[in-house]
Amino acid sequence: AQSVSQHNHHVILSEAASLELGCNYSYGGTVNLFWYVQYPGQHLQLLLKYFSGDPLVKGIKGFEAEFIKSKFSFNLRKPSVQWSDTAEYFCAVNAWGGSYIPTFGRGTSLIVHP
Amino acid sequence: NAGVTQTPKFQVLKTGQSMTLQCAQDMNHEYMSWYRQDPGMGLRLIHYSVGAGITDQGEVPNGYNVSRSTTEDFPLRLLSAAPSQTSVYFCASTTGSGNDSPLHFGNGTRLTVT
């Protein structure tokens, strides 16, 4: 079974700072990787996903993530955060040939000060 | 498109009471799942279904029952509520057409058990 680790539980930044949230997974086979975002009081929504091809994936709102297979990592990045990026961010992994039900990390709470 | 609809949005129960959280989707998705979200714990899978008539347990199934009589509906039943079940519950669905298919989440049900 796969597992996901998000090492940053709480991150506080000022607007215009750069962001990198770590995500590592544990699974020996081929995976699909996702980042979801949950804005305050809302449900989770997809930010970006990787399934094959270019390991650098671009998502909505200027976010991107890089899949590094050798490191089992899928870190989320944004060059310049905004106050509206305040949210909780979840990394998720789904093994190929699995149940289509992904495993989630514990989440990272991001607060951006204006 | 309504997407994934959860009812109720809020519920307060007394210990020992039972109730059903409703979840319906209108996207003809085969896969549906229930998660609970607790601070610092991320999303934990309670039960999931890969199609009508088929359900399986997730990570934290104790105290919960599910059934899937139709493709559209996936209710979650609390048999005898306990304070430990105080949480935010999310229902999600996905097509299952590929492992890269993202989850579509409902808006959540905030449950308090006193």
Image (cartoon, coloured by chain):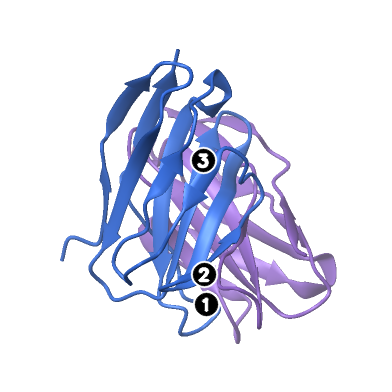
Chain colours: A purple, B blue
**Could you give the CA–CA distance between mark 2 and mark 1, rounded to whole angstroms?**
7 Å
| Quadrant where the N terminus of chain A is found in the figure | bottom right
Residue at 84%, 74% (x, y): give it. A28
Tell me how far mark 3 sits from mark 2, CA to CA.
Answer: 22 Å
Query: Against B13, is B63 above or below?
Result: below
Badge 3 is on which residue? B36
| Cβ–Cβ under 8 Å for marks 2 and 1 | yes
* Disc 3 with disc 1 on a shared chain: yes
Image side of residue B77 versus residue A67, left or right? left
Near-viewer residue (B80 or B2):
B80
What residue lies at 69% left-to-right and 46% top-to-bottom?
A6
Residue picked out by circle 2: A49
Give the amino acid at mark 3: Arg
Chain where mark 1 sits: B
Residue lying at the far left in this picture: please name it: B1
Q: Is residue A96 above or below residue B42?
A: below
Query: Residue B3: percent from the left, percent from the top?
Result: 24, 62
Q: Residue B63 or A8: which is nearer the viewer?
A: B63
Mark found first going from the N terminus, 3 or 1: 3
Q: Amino acid at mark 1?
A: Asp
Residue depicted at 40% across the width and 77% down the height:
B95
